[in-house]
Image (cartoon, helix red, strand yellow):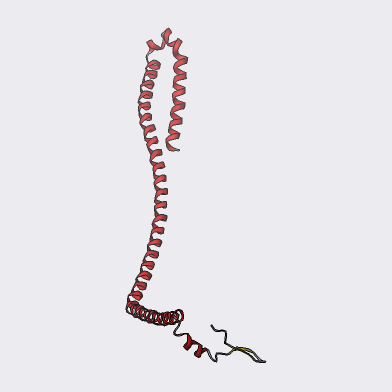
């Protein structure tokens, strides 16, 4: 169909000559296939223009929406910045609380240890009071043995006297140990 197109060769460049193209297109207008292609091409151009116009309209609308919402975006940005500042302050505050709680926990442990120590000393003290009463009774009995001439002369006393002296010495030693333990 387009076999009559001539190609002119120039020394400086290769150009295709479009002379006669219009004439050939006019001749082919009556051909159904070419007419359909030309018609569809025109439709496509119009469709493309419509799409481009729609895109421009949507673009302008979105720019207008952005301009309308710009104040809201600025406000939102400021709110986010303020929230970030408040959260930073809260983090600092909570870090301080965490340090304080650690310190309080350490103090509680020390107080618990002191309380347990005082409880043990009080328990020892109560035992010591009972022990002291028992020693007092023992001491009275030993004095009675030494003072009463009849008991002093008895043969039974001579048998148990070394054992009574051991009991007295052991109790004196325990008493000294407990006294130093209560004050140490």
Q: Is residue 1 left or right of residue 96?
A: right
Residue 77 position, x and y percent, is 37, 72
Residue 10 position, x and y percent, is 65, 92
Q: Residue at x 43, y 31 (%)?
A: 178
Please say if 103 is above or below 29.
above
**Quarter of the image containing the C terminus?**
top left
Foreground of the two, 79 or 152: 79
* Quadrant of residue 109 within the rendered picture: top left
Residue 39 position, x and y percent, is 41, 81
Foreground of the two, 149 or 51: 51
* Quadrant of residue 63 within the rendered picture: bottom left
Please say if 25 is above or below 130.
below
Please say if 1 is above or below 170.
below
* Quadrant of residue 112 within the rendered picture: top left
How many marks can you see? Answer: 0
Q: Residue at x 46, y 23 (%)?
A: 170
The residue lying furthest to the top in this view is 155
Please say if 31 is above or below 107.
below
Q: Residue at x 37, y 69 (%)?
A: 80
Foreground of the two, 20 or 170: 20
The residue lying furthest to the right in this view is 11
Residue 19 position, x and y percent, is 55, 92
Q: Residue at x 39, y 58 (%)?
A: 94
Foreground of the two, 46 or 96: 46
């Amino acid at each position: 169909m387009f076999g009559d197109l001539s190609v002119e060769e120039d020394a400086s460049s290769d150009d295709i000559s479009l002379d006669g193209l219009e004439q050939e297109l006019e001749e082919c207008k009556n051909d159904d296939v070419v007419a359909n292609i030309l018609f569809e091409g025109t439709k496509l151009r119009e469709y493309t223009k419509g799409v481009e116009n729609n895109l421009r309209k949507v673009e302008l609308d979105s720019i207008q929406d952005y301009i309308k919402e710009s104040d809201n975006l600025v406000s939102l940005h400021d709110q986010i910045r303020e929230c970030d500042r408040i959260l930073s302050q809260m983090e600092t505050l909570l870090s301080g609380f965490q340090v304080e709680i650690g310190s309080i926990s350490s103090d509680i442990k020390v107080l618990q240890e002191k309380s347990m120590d005082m409880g043990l000393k009080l328990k020892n003290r109560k035992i010591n009071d009972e022990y002291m009463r028992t020693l007092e009774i023992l001491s009275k009995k030993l004095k009675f043995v030494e003072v009463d001439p009849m008991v002093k002369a008895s043969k039974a006393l001579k048998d148990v006297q070394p054992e009574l002296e051991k009991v007295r010495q052991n109790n004196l030693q325990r008493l000294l140990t407990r006294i130093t333990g209560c004050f140490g």
